[in-house]
Amino acid sequence: MIAAAGGVLATVLKIPATMAFTALFGETASTQDSWSSAAQGGIVAVAASFLFLGILTPIAEEMFFRGVITTVLLRYGSIVGVLGSTVVFALLHGEPILMVSAVLVGLPAGELRRRTGSIWPGVALHIVFDLLSSIGLFILLPLLGG
């Protein structure tokens, strides 16, 4: 439940954090915006997007970033483990605007990994975040004419 609540909180924080980033740096485009075209592709495309982008991708990312990177870095202390894996996670997202969301997911997921010794709370947080973000896109894009 804590992980799910963390996913909801990270999703809510994503909006003002992304707006602040955009106001400071002027960047608004993301190469990941193109996947949202699945909303135009019918129910199968939408279901596939939710499955692959909302569930399977977070599982794979958490296995690597919290299961491997955080575990290795925790040898050097909790701050290095959690912050270090978050920085790597954010940087490997490649685009500055995506790094905002990566930090919002990476910090709590890393801390959950540290406190519980398991990646699964972070997986739950990440899935909730990605699914809520996807649902938001599928609802907002048609309303915005996208």
Image (tube, rainbow, N blue to C red):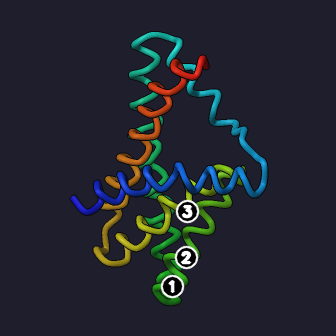
Marks 2,1: beta carbons within 8 A: yes
Q: Specify the quadrant of the image occupied by residue 100.
A: bottom right
Which residue in the structure is indicated by mark 2?
A: 83
> Looking at this rendering, what residue extends furthest in the right direction?
26
Residue type indicated by callout 2: Leu
State the image coordinates of residue 30 (x, y, percent, origin top left): 69, 39
Residue 75 vertical position relative to residue 130 in the rendered view, above or below: below
Residue at (60, 17) in percent of width and height: 145
Residue 103, label in figure: 3
> Looking at this rendering, what residue extends furthest in the top direction?
42
Residue 56 visible in this rendered orientation of the protein: no
**Is label 3 in a helix, a strand or a loop?**
helix
Q: Specify the quadrant of the image occupied by residue 37.
A: top right
Q: Earlier in the sequence, mark 3 or mark 2?
A: 2
State the image coordinates of residue 90 (x, y, percent, origin top left): 62, 60
State the image coordinates of residue 128 (x, y, percent, origin top left): 35, 47
- On the picture, is 5 further left or further right than 104? left
Residue type indicated by callout 1: Ile
Of residues 20 and 111, the one drawn nearer to the viewer in this rendering: 20
From the image, which quarter does the N terminus lie in? Answer: bottom left
State the image coordinates of residue 49 (x, y, percent, origin top left): 46, 27
